[in-house]
Image: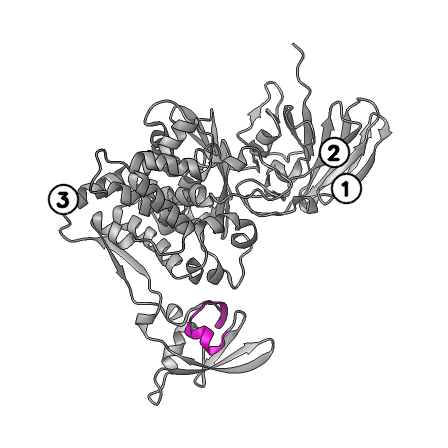
Amino acid sequence: MTASPTIHYRIAVADPHAHRFEVTLTVPAPEPRQALSLPVWIPGSYLVREFSRHLGAVSARQGNREVLVTQTAKNRWEFECGGRGALVVSYPVYAFDTSVRAAFLDAQRGFFNPTSLCLRAHGKDHLPHRVELTGLPAGWEVATAMASVEGAPLQFEAADYDELADHPFELGPFWRGEFVAGGVPHEFVVAGALPVFDGERLLRDAQKLCEAQIAFWHCGKGKPPMSRYVFLLNCTDDGYGGLEHRASTALIASRRDLPRLGQAEVSEGYAKLLGLISHEYFHTWNVKRLRPDVFERYDYEQENYTELLWFFEGFTSYYDDLFLVRCGLIDEARYLKLIAQTFTQVLGAPGRKHHSVARSSFEAWTKYYRQDENTPNAVVSYYAKGAMVALALDLSLRGAEKCDKPVSLDDLMRGLWKDTGGGPVDEARILRKLADLGGEASAQTLSTWVHGTDDLPLPQLLERMGVRWCLEKPTLAQRLGLRVSESDGVVMVKHVLLDSAALAAGLSAGDEIVASNGWRVRKLDDLPLTLNHVDPQRLELLVTRDQRMLSLALTLPTQESAARPVCLGLLDKAPARAQSLRRAWLGG
């Protein structure tokens, strides 16, 4: 049998100080006018990022003949080929993006997603694609979930372009460790860790999460849908985020959030990191395989729209911290604190009154991923409110009084996975499965929550679980309807919320609050200190805006009129049924 021709990329670490990779692409048997293009976005991050802006001059040859290259679009080139000899294309790529979405190179570390470096050969997406790495500095290693080529060091092969695009690479002198979960080898790679980093603890805790999620999706039977999995964690001074892939994830976190040798407790930062690990791993099933039907084949050259990110991101955001408590990595009290923070975030943003999670999903490309000073007034997060929808649905199913067989959101997720074989779904299929499990009323309720803008009945639903909902004293920023930054004694307005005292006073994003009632202000909490007995609710603010000094009158509103932080706690002497429901919910 004749082997299939292979698309070959030789990626050289050309100049780390100039942050430059050199790519040589070989296309066998090209078309007479062969088109190549670079993706404009990367799946999982819903923004057109224009990766082609980092490509340098593109040149090409066939044998000894120079090939005419014509750029026909911002990210597309066409090549005038003669005969069927291999087309060899060369180009440099500037790589200095520290995020998980693009490419990075310096003298200490390299990283890339193929969507940032590897031009796609049109008409040949289905062929095997091979990556060969060259020029690595002494002591550098390579980590990726892409299959290595036997007998060819530093060469890796994917079945097609989609598989190639779904495998990031980490390069450098990093820490690595391994564990087995669900019978499948897992590798954890950490770059930039401090010397006190406790790698063994990270492996133990990650293994617990992976084992729990594999058991969740497969009911304790069978192996996960990948033969190997790799976590790629880059640690920086201050970073946070992740991007899911079919057999790996790229993560970024603050190095101070890693577990430390001799540290027994789970710090706030480490809990946040574990939640990120849990979130991205859950995506192995929910979005990489069970996915929106419009993502069955990605269009890499334009936006791919879906109204379902509330399900694939929001429901994943619900399960990420839930698995921490189910695994015993955090206790119930900390879990309730974490979800209360999500409630506070959503309920404190006026955008929730105007924007549904379905619209937020569809408009991710133009709104959620392009945030500005008006975002809290115009947008609801399909992550945060999507997680609240998942919680409300889960609790409503669990707490149903008249139900022949108790069901939960767990059953919906596993049922969709089983019914589709881990394939694409649309909203109608999700609602049909929910109706089968919990009745037509449940499906209608979910549709209303997803497409509507009313607040969810979470206080009542949580009470059924023996959890008390209460509101704490608002912060001064919440009373005023302001979000500010405070640094070196400078108070800058970042957001002014709709229907707030700050908006009524005329404050605007970008203002610096200099003084109040004649007194210098160095932090927002200085404002109440300047109140006087003549008019104890009135503040005369001095602000700077575009080099001008403005005087603005602000009336301090009552605490009762403000958005307030949510607090959750266990009910004293909760009924036995409530305690049983809570144990089933938090224990899995």
Q: Secondary structure at mark 2?
A: strand
Residue 103 magenta: no
- Compared to 177, does 575 lie above or below? below
**Which quadrant holds the C terminus?**
top left
Q: Residues within 10 Å of mark 3 (few under 14, many from 20)?
A: few
What residue is pinned by disc 2?
Answer: 35
Residue type beneath disc 1: Thr
User: Which numbered disc, 3 or 2, marks the residue that appears first in the sequence?
Assistant: 2
- Horizontal side of 180 relative to 246 (left or right) equals left
Span of residues in magenta: 486-507
Image point (21%, 42%), residue name = 581
- Horizontal side of 222 relative to 71 (left or right) equals left
User: Which numbered disc, 1 or 2, marks the residue that appears first in the sequence?
Assistant: 2
Residue 301 % position (x, y): 65, 41
Residue 84 % position (x, y): 79, 22
Task: Using the image, tell me which numbered label, if any, was put on residue 72.
Answer: 1
Q: How many circles with numbers are drawn on the protein? A: 3
Residue 104 % position (x, y): 61, 43
Residue 96 seen in this snapshot:
yes
- Compared to 503, does 26 lie above or below? above
What residue is pinned by disc 3?
Answer: 576
Q: Secondary structure at mark 3?
A: helix
User: Which numbered disc, 3 or 1, marks the residue that appears first in the sequence?
Assistant: 1
Image point (57%, 37%), residue name = 172
